[in-house]
């Protein structure tokens, strides 16, 4: 497989933090906070099945609105599963797709991150690309 200069593989993050569908929402929140990231792909048996975002998690929490509500957040997180909160069957891009294609997806949708899959396997997670990655790339062209 020959990658062109403007392929997604050039600017994607290939060391992707992901969670297993059986992990807890508390683990997702911890991963987001620890690594200061906003989106986490969800895998089951090493296959991509979804994506969960900081926004998805924040919709479930009270601690941002009220003081001393971390216990309430934990109770909500224990009642729900990742599968109930994540986006199922997320839109994906292939590692050899053009960066322009990804920019067009971001410009015409409300996505801020897309899982990147192998060219020959649409469930094999190989990276993630975000609006920030595309903006940084575009800035190098100016």
Image (tube, rainbow, N blue to C red):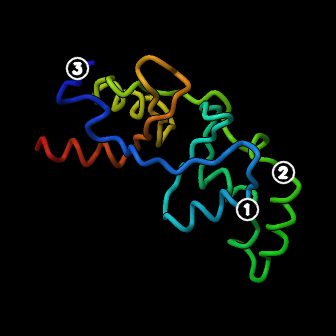
Mark 3 or mark 1, which has the lower sequence index? 3
Q: Which residue is mark 3?
A: 2
Secondary structure at numbered mark 1 = helix
Mark 2 or 3, closer to the camera:
3
Q: Residues within 10 Å of mark 2 (few under 14, many from 20)?
A: few
Residue 61 at what x, y percent from top left?
74, 63
Residue 127 at what x, y percent from top left?
43, 39
Task: Count how many numbered circles sit on residues in the image.
Answer: 3
Name the image quarter holding the N terminus: top left
Mark 2 or mark 3, which has the lower sequence index? 3
Residue at image position (68%, 45%) is 20
Residue at image position (36%, 30%) is 102
Mark 2 or mark 1, which has the lower sequence index? 1
Q: Which residue is mark 1?
A: 26
Residue 62 at what x, y percent from top left?
76, 68
Horizontal side of 78 relative to 61 (left or right) equals right
Residue 110's place in the image compared with 75, above or below, is above
């Amino acid at each position: 497989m020959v990658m062109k200069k403007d392929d997604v593989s050039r600017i994607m993050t290939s060391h992707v933090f992901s969670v297993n569908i059986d992990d807890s929402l508390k683990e997702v929140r911890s991963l987001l906070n620890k690594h200061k990231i906003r989106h986490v792909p969800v895998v089951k048996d090493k296959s991509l099945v979804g994506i969960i975002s900081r926004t998805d998690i924040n919709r479930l929490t009270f601690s941002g609105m009220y003081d001393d509500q971390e216990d309430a957040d934990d109770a909500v997180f224990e009642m729900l599963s990742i599968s109930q909160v994540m986006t199922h069957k997320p839109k994906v891009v292939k590692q050899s797709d053009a960066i322009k294609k990804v920019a067009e997806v971001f410009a015409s949708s409300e996505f801020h991150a897309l899982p990147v899959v192998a060219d020959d396997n649409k469930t094999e997670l190989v990276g993630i690309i975000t609006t920030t990655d595309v903006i940084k790339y575009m800035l190098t062209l100016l």
